[in-house]
Amino acid sequence: MEKVTVTDTIKYIGVNDKTIDLFESQYVVPNGVSYNSYIILDDKIAVMDSVDERGTEGWFANLEEALAGRLPDYLVVDHLEPDHAGNIAVFAEKYPGAQLVLSAKAQSMLPQFFAQDMSDKCVVVKEGDELCLGSHTLTFIMAPMVHWPEVMVTYEKSEKVLFSADGFGKFGALDTEEDWACEARRYYFNIVGRYGMQVQALLKKASALEIQAICPLHGPVLKENLGYYIDKYNTWSSYTPEDQGILIAYASIHGNTAAAAKKLGDMLQEMGAPKVVVSDLAREDMAEVIEDAFRYDKIVLASATYDAGLFPCMESLLSHLKSKNYQKRTAGLIENGSWAPMAGKLMKDALAGMREITVLEPVVSIKSTLNASSEEQLRALAEALMA
């Protein structure tokens, strides 16, 4: 792939993975993913994180090329998740003189991943500690639960570069041209979304720094218009709706609940809704639906009753929303049932366990198929959503 430029002395040595089908064995990544790693060349040399085992050969080739015969002094471990730490033990064996710079929590977790005892190589750092490489100085900033407990980020003072761990990352390999916000949003809410409070705390720390480049562990190096990316993260991590719009997510067995959801979508568009997205939960990528749920300020859940409960894909959506800390939204409900509709009550109960969710009336209740009465309820719900 084309060389990624950070600065003259900070080089990109990461790799693309275009063979992976599911990130974390659950998120579809049609354009692959990058495992980012960087090297700082100075009197002493620091390597910033390793990569997934899937990228071992390419990473060591890039590392050796950048070293040009020299030996690394440090491997900074900002994040111990296997897609970034998969080669720590191999690195330690290949470069026995190098030290591992990491948080105390990361040191305690090392034996969970590697049988090799590396305790004698560890340099444990805490908030505000610095490491001088020569003309470059690294400052370590603890970022627990963004999105693992051992995470830290590293700020290089002379060139004003923030190594942001999983923060500001996105799906997609670096040789793919695509909109940053779409895949970064899908990445954020599905990977980091639960931990908005912790991301807010990190953003507060970062606001005190002068930053000229952000180097995440996935996705492109960010150098221009940094305010745009930081503003997106502030919006996402505060659970503030990003755009006005309505997501209609439906779980339909024989197509009748789907017909009601699509009918509501048509009504809303006729009324001038700014954006309407209709999603079939049985067929669409759940991560995309989660992204849209957090992007827009309103959601409509439409589900058939199934075995006196919710159709499974609606249960799955509600479980995902709760686990990702869904909040500060307005919701409408559509239920369907041929003899004993229960979906409305169950969806309302699920939403009651989330913060600051306003459920609109009426809850549309359909028995098997739409009729004049239930269409009237749909229109009333559409009007409530547009109010």
Image: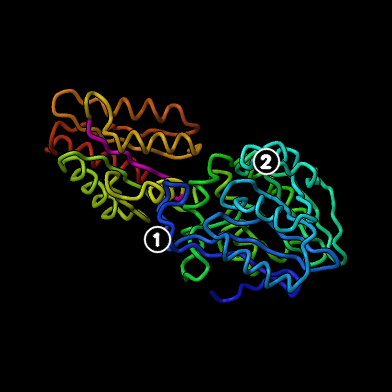
- Residue 104 lies in the magenta stretch: no
Disc with the residue nearer the chain's start (2 vs 1)? 1
Q: Residue at 74% of width from left, 75% of height from top?
A: 8
Residue 99 numbered tag: none
Comparing 134 with 272, the one in front is 134
Q: What's the CA distance linking mark 2 and mark 1?
A: 32 Å
Range shown magenta: 295-305
Where does residue 202 sit, x and y in percent of width and height? Answer: 69, 46
Write down the residue under mark 2: 110
Callout 2 environment at 10 Å: few (<14), some (14 to 19), or many (20+)?
some
**Does dot 2 land on a helix, a strand or a loop?**
helix
Callout 1 environment at 10 Å: few (<14), some (14 to 19), or many (20+)?
some
Q: What amino acid type is highlighted by mark number 1?
A: Pro
Q: What amino acid type is highlighted by mark number 2?
A: Leu
Q: Is residue 161 left or right of residue 176?
A: right
**What is the quadrant of the C terminus in the image?**
top left
- Residue 304 lies in the magenta stretch: yes
Residue 30 numbered tag: 1
Secondary structure mostly seen in the magenta stretch: strand
**Does dot 1 land on a helix, a strand or a loop?**
loop
Comparing 258 with 253, the one in front is 253
